[in-house]
Image (spheres, rainbow, N blue to C red):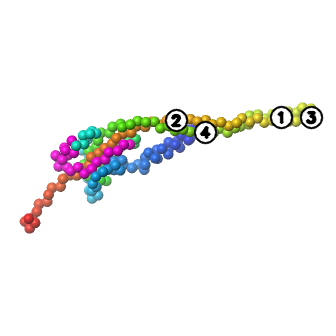
Amino acid sequence: MELRIFLILMNILSVLMLGGCANGYYQAYNGYTYPNNKGNCRISGGYTYGNEEDAISKMAEKGFTYVGNSVFESSDSYTRSDALAACDDIGADVVIIMQPFNSGNGVVPIVSTQYHPGQTTYNTSMNWNGGYTTTTGWTPGYTTTSVNYIQYSTFTYGALFFKKKSKPKKKGRDEL
């Protein structure tokens, strides 16, 4: 019975944690979007937390404009594919992914209580001198409580998103 309760709680916890399998990179995005530029994104290098300005400068030298970022903490695992999918949804041309780092660990206690009902312990019948008697014994119920622990780690994820700088269009003689 305890295992059953534990499994039910684990299922509920996993549903809450997954949150519909949403993409954390996209949910935490802060910046501009380009809905007409889907499917053109690529991944370029990476960076570490605190070196965002260096990454933005290097991309500017390569002809890219910084359009937004995404930084979030999660106990779920996110991959390069998730960052690339967010980049496509945003409509950016390039994403640079931050090296994820462990930002916390913890333990969640799960307490389960089980009631064990009382039961009949004996039935006795006696017959003496023409008399007859029956007795029944009863053991009261009791409760047990168990605590199980779930360990988790939280990681910080991040990404920088860029658009290729567009070249100015040449003007014809009539447009000068």
Q: Residue at x 30, y 51 (%)?
A: 30
Residue occupied by mark 2: 148
Q: CA–CA distance between discs 2 and 1?
A: 46 Å
Figure quadrant of the C terminus: bottom left
Q: CA–CA distance between discs 3 and 4?
A: 46 Å
Instruction: Mark yes or no: residue 125 visible.
Output: yes
Label placed on residue 125: 1
Assess whether mark 3 and mark 1 are in contact (beta carbons under 8 angstroms).
Answer: no
Q: Is residue 86 left or right of residue 14?
A: left
Instruction: Mark yes or no: residue 39 visible.
Output: no
Q: Mark 1 or mark 4, which is nearer the start of the sequence?
A: 4
Q: Position of residue 16 (x, y in %)?
A: 46, 47
Closer mark to the observer between disc 3 and disc 4: 4
Q: Is residue 114 left or right of residue 156?
A: right
Residue stretch in magenta: 54-74
Q: Position of residue 31 (x, y in %)?
A: 28, 52
Assess whether mark 1 and mark 4 are in contact (beta carbons under 8 angstroms).
Answer: no
Amino acid identity at mark 1: Ser
Q: CA–CA distance between discs 3 and 2?
A: 58 Å
Q: Residues within 10 Å of mark 3 (few under 14, many from 20)?
A: few
Q: Which residue is at the front of the view, 73 or 90? A: 73
Label placed on residue 38: none
Amino acid identity at mark 2: Asn
Q: CA–CA distance between discs 1 and 3?
A: 13 Å
Residue occupied by mark 3: 130
Amino acid identity at mark 3: Gly
Q: CA–CA distance between discs 4 and 1?
A: 34 Å
